[in-house]
Every structure is written in structure tokens, then in C-alpha cells.
Amino acid sequence: MSTLLVGHFSFFLPAQAAPLESKTILAVFAHPDDESFVGPVLARYAREGHKVYLVVVTDGQLGVTAHAGIAAGEPLKQARLAETQCATQALGIEAPIMLDFVDGSLAQSKTMQPVAAQLGQLFSQLKADVVITWGPEGGYGHPDHRMVSNLVAEVFQKGGDNWPQALYFAAAADIDLHNYNDYSANFGQYIKARWHTSAQQWLTHKIAFNQSDKQQAAAAVACHQSQFTAADIADINAFVGAKPWHVYLRQAYTQTALRQSLFE
């Protein structure tokens, strides 16, 4: 595969149903590997015949880990590009779209406008029907995650030609997160301690996936060897792929009649 550098309730059909028409899903995340937490959903909709793109805003060049021993900068950037290509192939989705901003730079004034401009171009050019990104809490709160959520929401709410119909935030329910007691590695303990959850009433979509989707998502997580040890990979798959097999999403905006009171 080549690499580019640069919605509605009715859309999420039951897992067994064939799509009436192909739609376009745009998943926008901050770092290579962030897609892991919605991987089964991306695999499912690609399997059902929809076009699924992954946009990665940063190049991951500062994500040095002791176990991998890859130097920061260009060596790690290239390694994480290859890992993201591996992950998109494993998921069965389109080649990744890498925006190539530097880790940790997204909250800078000089970076925010270029990121927003490129996202707007992608929304229109790809004619995305649905966008999925981090929620405002950023999963476990990483500043780049939070900033990507902010910028995606900013661009989405402006509207435009060929604009997405819906924006969804990746989410986790408290009951799902704290049911896991068998994490083996530090990463699993970190998820349990730090992952931000949503109260049940704010979760608008519960997207089912099957065994094949789970296996593809697990293969995609395993691509990210520079970031995760084997134990970390097992922890992520336990979090994402635990039964019952589903991923929660929160719809960010809904269309409604203009109201004249805060209590209507």
C-alpha cells in the first residue's frame, strides 16, 4: 500500500447486515498506535465494504521506549510509519494518511491552524460520511490526544462542502474498564488507573464486532513493536477485545430545532 503524507444512528448497521451502500469513515488520531482502541470497529466496517481511512496527526518520532532501543527523530519516525502501514494492512483499511506533525507540538499556536486546515481538506476531499476521534478526555488524558479531539471538533462544527454527517468520540464505560482484573503488565495497570470513562447515559453507540474483526485488530496492535512489549500487547487486546465484543462511541453533535431556554 502507498502512504499519503500530507454519522447518523442508521449508519451503524447490525454486524450481520450487508451495507446498502458504501460509506466513508475517517478515523483521526494523534499518534501511530492510537487506532488500537477502535481497531475492531475499523476492521468491521472495512469487512462490510465501507472505505475506512486512518489519519495520524503526528509522526511519533519522540515516542522512545527502553525495550525497542530506537533513537528519537528520523529512525523512530520511519519505524512508526512502517508500523502504521502494517496496522492498516492488518485491519484491511486504506493506507494511512500521515500529517507528519511532531509529537507534543499540537497545542502550539503555530501548529493548530495548519492541522485544522489539513483536516478540513481531508473531510472534503475524501467525502467522509463519519469521523471517529478521541473524546475531549483523550483516553488516558494525553495532551496530544486531547488536542486532536479539540481540533477535529472545531473543524467538524464549521461545516462545509462534502462534509461528514456525524462525529463520534471513542469512549469507555466505567463498568467495562473496571471489570478487568487480570492485567499482567504495567501498561494494563496504567489503563485501569488512568483511562477516563463516560457515564452510561452519555454513550450513544455500542458497536458490535466479530471474531474476525477481533483477530485483525489484535494483529494490528502487534505491529506497534516500537511502543509495546508482548505483555503490553496482551493487555491492550484484553481491554479492547474482551467479551462481550463491542466498542462504545459518543456522538458529539446532533441536529435539533433552535431552542430558547436552557431547560427545554
Image (tube, rainbow, N blue to C red):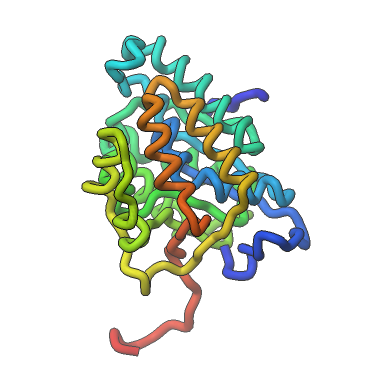
Q: In the image, residue 86 lies at what x, y percent?
A: 57, 25
| Residue 136 drawn above or below residue 20 | above
Please report the residue visible at 35 percent of the width from the left and 11 percent of the height from the top. Answer: 70
| Residue 152 drawn above or below residue 15 | above
Foreground: 181 or 112? Answer: 181
Foreground: 183 or 79? Answer: 183
Please report the residue visible at 65 percent of the width from the left and 51 percent of the height from the top. Answer: 45
Q: In the image, residue 38 lies at what x, y percent?
A: 49, 47
Residue 253 found in image quarter:
bottom left
| Residue 140 drawn above or below residue 204 | above
Q: In the image, residue 252 lies at what x, y percent?
A: 43, 63
Foreground: 160 or 103? Answer: 103
Q: Residue farthest to the front? A: 182
Q: Residue farthest to the left? A: 193
| Residue 97 drawn above or below residue 262 | above
Please report the residue visible at 37 percent of the width from the left and 74 percent of the height from the top. Answer: 201
Please report the residue visible at 50 percent of the width from the left and 59 percent of the height from the top. Answer: 244
Residue 123 makes an appearance in the image: no
Q: How many marks?
A: 0
Position of 245 with respect to 63 (left or right) is: right
The quadrant in which the N terminus is found is top right
Q: In the image, residue 196 lies at what x, y percent?
A: 28, 54
Foreground: 249 or 105? Answer: 249
Position of 47 with respect to 214 (left or right) is: right
Residue 262 makes an appearance in the image: yes
The quadrant in which the C terminus is found is bottom left
